[in-house]
Amino acid sequence: MLSARMPTYLPSTSSAGWVDRFTPKFDIVQKDDNVTVLAELPGVKKEDVKVDVTQDGRLTISGSTNEEKEYQDEADVTHRERSCGSFSRSISVPTGIKPNEIKASMEHGLLKVIIPTKPKEPAVAQITIA
């Protein structure tokens, strides 16, 4: 007999019956000369996360998670949950970024990527009158 304190929730499933994949949630904030990307990565270790910027202006956050939890109550009922798989999210970043100045840190499952940007200089040109 299962314990009354056993969790009664089930993981959400897609219409095909598969358990939903892990998709990190992003907050993107542009302020002054920085774009800050905050990605929620609960249970993911820093060493399992990769941040890339491509020349065509794409920031990609990817990685993998492999977590196993086991719960046991005094009635010797065991409940195990496993979460594993990979993830990848990409966003466009402003043109003119400085890839060597991008900073990333991760604490308590929150990845913070700061992308310095420069305000665009107005183009100076002499216009010939026809």
Image (cartoon, rainbow, N blue to C red):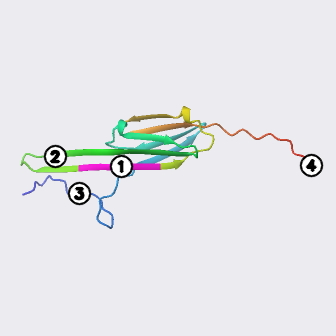
Q: Judge left or right: residue 63 versus residue 70.
A: right
Residue under numbered circle 2: 71
| Image location (x, y in percent) of residue 63 | 38, 44
> Is residue 108 visible in the rendered structure shown here?
no
Residue under numbered circle 4: 129
Residue positioned 86% across, 42% down in the render: 126
What's the CA distance linking mark 2 and mark 4? 79 Å
Residue under numbered circle 3: 9
> Is residue 104 visible in the rendered structure shown here?
yes
| Image location (x, y in percent) of residue 24 | 40, 49
Q: Nearer the viewer, mark 1 or mark 4?
A: 1
| Image location (x, y in percent) of residue 45 | 33, 38
Q: Label 2's element?
A: strand
Q: Looking at the image, do the residues carrying marks 3 and 2 touch, with CB atoms under 8 Å apart?
A: no
Image quadrant in which the N terminus is located: bottom left
Q: Nearer the viewer, mark 1 or mark 2?
A: 1
Q: Nearer the viewer, mark 2 or mark 4?
A: 4
Residue ranking furthest to the bottom: 15
Crowdedness near tag 4: few (<14), some (14–19) or many (≥20) residues, C-alpha within 10 Å: few
Q: Provide the residue span drawn in magenta.
A: 82-89
Q: Looking at the image, do the residues carrying marks 1 and 3 touch, with CB atoms under 8 Å apart?
A: no
What's the CA distance linking mark 1 and mark 3? 24 Å
Sooner in the amino-acid sequence: mark 1 or mark 4: 1
Disc 1 residue type (three-letter): Ser
Q: Which quadrant would residue 32 be assigned to in this image?
A: top right
Question: Residue 85 in magenta?
Answer: yes
What's the CA distance linking mark 1 and mark 2? 24 Å
Disc 4 residue type (three-letter): Ile
Residue under numbered circle 1: 86
Q: Label 1's element?
A: strand
